[in-house]
Image (tube, grey):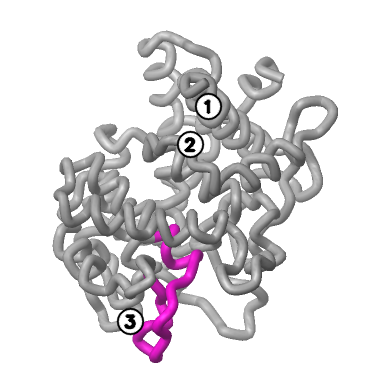
């Protein structure tokens, strides 16, 4: 299994070395540096428009038609998030040049706002905070906006502007990812940490994927593991967030963890359950086949859970 994981794109390989193989920091750094020069990361960087954005837009490509099946994933927001997940070194010359051009020239379709100033939807702003903080941009004003938009049940919902008073797990996970990255980059604040804890509690109260009212699965897609996930929620994405946040095991996560464990194949891998439909620059993996991304993420979630549980026994 380890040999198969390491025989992969640099975006996967360096994270396997760091999270599963106990490689030295020098080995990890050497492989991480390859993300900007080889494989998927280099391909995405090369596909940027000459003036900075990807496919001519912030959230949607310049050529987007609403008759197009699915949601196109080639615009700047989705591409920057993918590069972040790949682990593109934000201090590298190619990353700094690319994000500087985005900051200078990319504007939101909503009202022409500068990209790293965000726009109005919490799910979009959460993802903008995540990539902005990661790539060294000042996103504190968007954080302040999101802190004021948290709903009474602890989470966030893009439909709040249309009257919704209940949070959404999809919106909430995007905001949580953003706030966590902001804390890592800046140290955060007590207010940010309190908001993030409130969002976590919103997810935990639902066992990460069940309705609070009935106990039913919120969405039949949530037990499926997609990659890339973009704005979409699923159980593996939520657990990997808690792992990255350094959370302590919570009994309310147990069913979700066992769901991950149950989807392991006899050869030790996890499959790619789905991709979210829409335009992409290129495919990363194939639905129904062994997925290095899902296997990497599932193994490190289980290592985190089992290791933390072991220290408590």
Q: Please tell me whether residue 169 belongs to the stretch shown in magenta.
A: yes
Q: Is residue 61 above or below residue 291?
A: below
Asked whether the beta carbons under mark 1 and mark 2 sit within 8 Å of each other, the answer is: yes
Asked whether the beta carbons under mark 1 and mark 3 sit within 8 Å of each other, the answer is: no
Q: Quadrant of residue 91?
A: top left
Residue density around tag 2, few if under 14, some if 14–19, many if 20 or more, within 10 Å: some
Give the secondary structure at mark 3: loop
Q: Which disc is residue 309 wearing?
A: 1
Q: Quadrant of the N terminus?
A: top right
Give the secondary structure at mark 2: loop
In the image, residue 95 lies at what x, y percent? 31, 41
Which residue occupies 43% across, 61% down? 202
> Over which residues does the magenta segment extend?
156-174
Q: Nearer the viewer, residue 209 or 114?
A: 209
The residue that mark 3 highlights is: 110
In the image, residue 278 lies at what x, y percent? 63, 67
The residue that mark 2 highlights is: 249
Q: Nearer the viewer, residue 66 or 288?
A: 288
Q: Is residue 160 above or below residue 15?
A: below
In the image, residue 178 lies at what x, y percent? 33, 54
Q: Is residue 259 above or below residue 215?
A: above
């Amino acid at each position: 299994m380890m040999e198969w994981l390491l025989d992969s794109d640099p975006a996967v390989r360096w994270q396997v070395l760091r999270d599963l193989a106990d490689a030295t920091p020098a080995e990890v750094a050497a492989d991480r540096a390859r993300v900007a020069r080889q494989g998927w990361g280099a391909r995405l960087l090369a596909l940027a428009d000459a003036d900075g954005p990807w496919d001519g837009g912030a959230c949607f490509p310049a050529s987007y038609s609403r008759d197009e099946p699915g949601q196109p994933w080639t615009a700047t927001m989705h591409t920057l998030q993918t590069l972040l997940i790949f682990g593109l070194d934000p201090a590298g010359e190619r990353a700094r040049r690319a994000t500087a051009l985005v900051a200078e020239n990319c504007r939101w379709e909503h009202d022409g706002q500068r990209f790293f100033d965000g726009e109005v939807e919490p799910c979009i702003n959460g993802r903008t905070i995540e990539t902005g903080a990661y790539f060294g941009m000042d996103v504190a004003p968007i954080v302040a906006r999101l802190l004021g938009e948290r709903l009474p049940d602890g989470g966030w919902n893009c439909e709040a502007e249309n009257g919704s008073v209940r949070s959404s797990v999809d919106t909430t996970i995007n905001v949580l990812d953003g706030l966590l990255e902001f804390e890592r980059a800046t140290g955060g604040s007590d207010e940010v940490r309190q908001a993030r804890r409130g969002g976590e509690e919103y997810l935990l109260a639902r066992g990460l994927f069940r309705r609070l009212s009935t106990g039913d699965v919120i969405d039949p897609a949530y037990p499926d593991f997609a990659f890339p996930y973009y704005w979409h929620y699923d159980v593996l994405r939520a657990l990997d967030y808690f792992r990255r946040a350094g959370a302590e095991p919570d009994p309310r996560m147990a069913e979700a963890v066992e769901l991950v464990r149950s989807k392991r194949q006899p050869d030790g891998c996890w499959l790619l359950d789905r991709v979210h439909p829409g335009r992409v620059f290129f495919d990363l993996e194939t639905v129904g086949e062994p997925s290095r991304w899902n296997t990497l993420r599932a193994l490190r979630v289980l290592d985190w859970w089992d290791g933390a549980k072991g220290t408590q026994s």
